[in-house]
Image (cartoon, rainbow, N blue to C red):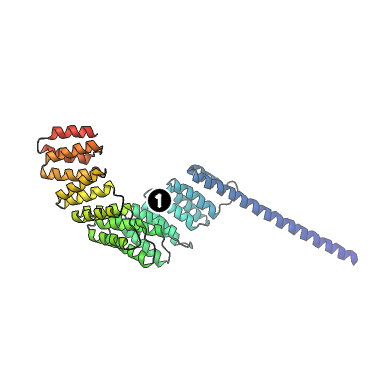
Amino acid sequence: SSSSAVSSSASSSSAASSSSSTSAAASSSRSSAAAASKRCNTAITAHGRGRRWQEALELFHHMPEDGVQRTVVTYGAVVGALEKARRWQEAIEVLEAAHLERAPLNAIAYSSAISACSKASAGTPALALLGRALSTAITPDAVLFSAALDACARGRNWAEALGLYEQMRSLEVQPNMGTYSLVSSACEKGQQWAAALDLVMEMRSHQHKLDMRVVNSAISACGKGRQWAEAMRLFQDLQDGDVRPDAVVCETMLSAMDRSSRGSEAIALLESLGSRQVQLSQAMVGSAVAACVGGGRPEEARRVLAEAEVWNGAGTLAYNAMLTECSRSHAASEALGLLSRMQQRGVPCTAVTCGLALTGCGRALEWERAVHLLCSLE
């Protein structure tokens, strides 16, 4: 009886020892497999950072052959490498393979693939990928939508951009500054000034700090739509509030006035900016001069140009605007004088400069002198 008990105890101890060894071996195997996956993921990420997408993709394909498991990190890393190289077709193929293998994917992989499509101006595949991502269990975020919105902005597809933005809100995805900027950019390129202004109002209603990129896009959209008064209202609201318009926004505002030929308003704004110690640029001066010329105020245009010449603020745009007036009024002598002033100040001429000068001077049979001056400006 005692011998039987000892034998039974020994047997139990041996079984426990065997079970423990098996468990330890399995744990060691899992640890080894995880380490191998981690090494491959690190290498793929490094290839991506080095713009070596071929090496990243090759390592990705060899992982199953080498008995290394591909994880959600693996897919994100290889698609990220392809995104940096704008290899959108290969990125989609990787996602297709993951779908067939029922491999895990996250929002990062989809965002990178969509971004690859966007950078290559492949808008339709980008939106299709977003649709697929939303049909899975992946939780969408602002980064995922922003990648698709970038494709819309690049393709001037403002309607699709607004649709995606509404979809974001319906899914309760909180937009970020990048999201607002991309939607406003799409509206601007599509000349949808009302939608762009609505976006600014929505940012304010949610107490977001206004991003100058969003403001600039809204003002530019108004300018393209000949809605200078709406643009000026927004610009004035900024000045009256605690947000100071930057130089780019000021240039865009003056450009909007130029498009609507609002000469007096452009001069008033230019003088206001100068009095507030805003650094005036050649683009600002050029828009003001062009607005005066377009609005039938050539004398004011001449005054603004002359004043700007004092501090080297007169650039090609301003001179071209005055040459437009000379061409219209057959003022060959003034056109030649403008070309001479450009020469003295080292202001470069463009094809537009040449065309305007030759048109204006040719009508007065002064084209030879114009050609001589233009050659000296090259």
Give x and y (percent) for residue 154.
Answer: 34, 52
In the rendered image, the quadrant that contains the C terminus is top left
In the rendered image, the quadrant that contains the N terminus is bottom right
Task: Tell me the SS state at disc 1.
Answer: helix
Give left or right: position of 152 versus 337.
Answer: right
| Image: 375 above or below 42 | above
Q: Quadrant of residue 184?
A: bottom left
| Image: 47 above or below 72 | above
Task: Please name whichever residue, 104 or 83, is drawn nearer the observer in this view of the structure.
Answer: 83
| Image: 85 above or below 188 | above
Give left or right: position of 57 versus 25.
Answer: left
Residue at label 1? 117
Q: Amino acid at mark 1?
A: Cys
| Image: 9 above or below 310 | below
Q: Is residue 317 visible?
A: no
The residue depicted at 13 percent of the width and 34 percent of the height is: 367
* Count of marks overlaid on the render: 1
Give x and y (percent) for residue 315.
Answer: 25, 43
Give left or right: position of 221 versus 100.
Answer: left
